[in-house]
Structures are given as structure tokens and as C-alpha cells.
């Protein structure tokens, strides 16, 4: 899996959009960009993934740059329950395990 | 959505005893499950890949005789921490993917985690 780089921490006001960046400049053509989050003392939760096109689901939107070297996860209206560590992972879907980096600790404040 | 269940969620044991953690896929079959370990304020570290009907594959530095993995059915994998010591205290998390889904579209589901404290 390609190395990903994320800021260690971010703050966001409740109700505002949270934009979490991820750099994956060495991503290969067959690697997807996955986002997971981990709320304290729980297992990771899948959020979204994409290859080239932008993706949106009920939880978030994923914007991938045209050169695929970076992406942004957008939580459109952050709530206090979105406080968690967010992991960006480049993964080739080979059936192997996901390798987690340090992620971004997002704190949503009232 | 698919659910992966772990049991127990918390366990406290004395040093030298063995502890078994179960990981079940509740509504799908998983030929492969993964076991992770997470120490406080650190990220998840892959310990081993559990394969149904065959031996597990361990990551470098993980003792296979200490962390026994059994994947006897398509919905159950167990991790046994043998002769546990305080340094084995950690948050153990399992994950699984639906074997019937294309790996390009099927996400990895994670259990709730099991917190082990060895006194």
C-alpha cells in the first residue's frame, strides 16, 4: 500500500463542514483510497472509498484530485459524534489487510 | 450492514493465564479474517491473517506460539493469548470481508474490539 500523510489533528465547529486532507503522492493505478474512522475504544468504521471519481454516500464525500496524489474527506455538517481518528488508506484490494497509519484526530467542538 | 462481533469486549486476567477472544461474522462468510492490536495512543497494528481451514499467517515480530489463531469455520476465528503478561495488555480488534463480494467493492468490517488487561 502506498504511504499516506495526514495532519495529526484538526478542529471543527459543530454544524460546519469538516475537510480532512490526505496526501498519497506515490499511489499506484490499482490502489483505491479508503477512509475509516475510529471512535475512542471502538473498532474502525468504514466511511467511503474511491478510485478516480469523487464519491458521496450518506456519511461523507470523497474528493480525489485528478492526478490522484491527494484526496479530501468531507463531512458536510459535523456533529459532536464525529469526533474520532480518521484514517486515509491507499489499498490495492488484493484481499490483504488494511495498513493503518496515524490518522487525523478530529475534534468537533460545540 | 454487515456485522462483525467480538467477545469478550473486556477481560482482566492474571499473569500467566490464557485468554481466548472470539470473532464472528454475523451475516456473511469470511474465508479470511484479520487480527490487529492497538496500544494506547497508537494506531492499529496487523498481527496476523486468519485463513479458514489452514494455518494463520503472522506478521514479523508476532509470536505464533503465543498468539494462537484458529479459523475453524467461515464465520468464526479465535485468538488465544497464551501465558499472558502485562505487556500483552492491549486492544485487540478483528476484521473480515464478505468472501462473496468483489474485493474491489467490499469493505473490511471491524469488530468492536476486546480490551485485555493482564495484572
Image (spheres, grey):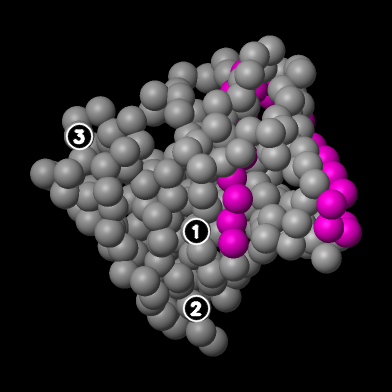
* Callout 1 and callout 3 share a chain: no
Q: Residue furthest left?
A: A67
Residue B59 visible in rendering: yes
Callout 2: chain = A
Q: Quadrant of the C terminus of chain B?
A: bottom right
Question: Disc 2 or 3, which lies upstream in sequence?
Answer: 3
Q: Residue at x 44, y 82 (%)?
A: A13
Residue, disc 3: A28
Residue under label 1, please give it: B43
Q: Nearer the viewer, residue A91 or B89?
A: B89
Spatial CA span between label 2 and label 1: 20 Å
Mark 3 falls on what kind of element? loop
In the rendered image, the vertical position of residue B100 relative to residue B97, given as above or below: above
Q: Which structural element holds mark 1?
A: loop
Residue A54 coordinates in the image, percent (x, y):
28, 44
Name which residue lies at 23% across and 37% down: A52
Amino acid at each position: 500500500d502506498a504511504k499516506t500523510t495526514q495532519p495529526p489533528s484538526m478542529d471543527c465547529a459543530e454544524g460546519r463542514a469538516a475537510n480532512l486532507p490526505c496526501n498519497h503522492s506515490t499511489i499506484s493505478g490499482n490502489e483505491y483510497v479508503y477512509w475509516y474512522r475510529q471512535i475512542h475504544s471502538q473498532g474502525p468504521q468504514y466511511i467511503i472509498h474511491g478510485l478516480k471519481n469523487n464519491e458521496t454516500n450518506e456519511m461523507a464525500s470523497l474528493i480525489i484530485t485528478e492526478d490522484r496524489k491527494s484526496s479530501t474527506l468531507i463531512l458536510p455538517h459535523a456533529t459532536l459524534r464525529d469526533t474520532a481518528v480518521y484514517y486515509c488508506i491507499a489499498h490495492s484490494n488484493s484481499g490483504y489487510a488494511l495498513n493503518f497509519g496515524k490518522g487525523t484526530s478530529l475534534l468537533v467542538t460545540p | 450492514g454487515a456485522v462483525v462481533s467480538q467477545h469478550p469486549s473486556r477481560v482482566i486476567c492474571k499473569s500467566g493465564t490464557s485468554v481466548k477472544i472470539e470473532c464472528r461474522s454475523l451475516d456473511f462468510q469470511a474465508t479470511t479474517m484479520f487480527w490487529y492490536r492497538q496500544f494506547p495512543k497508537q494506531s492499529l497494528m496487523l498481527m496476523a491473517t486468519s485463513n479458514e481451514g489452514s494455518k494463520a499467517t503472522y506478521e514479523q515480530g508476532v509470536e505464533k506460539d503465543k498468539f494462537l489463531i484458529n479459523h475453524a469455520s467461515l464465520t468464526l476465528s479465535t485468538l488465544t493469548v497464551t501465558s499472558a503478561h502485562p505487556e500483552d495488555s492491549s486492544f485487540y480488534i478483528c476484521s473480515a470481508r464478505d468472501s462473496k463480494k468483489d474485493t474491489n467493492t467490499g469493505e473490511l468490517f471491524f469488530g468492536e474490539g476486546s480490551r485485555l488487561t493482564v495484572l
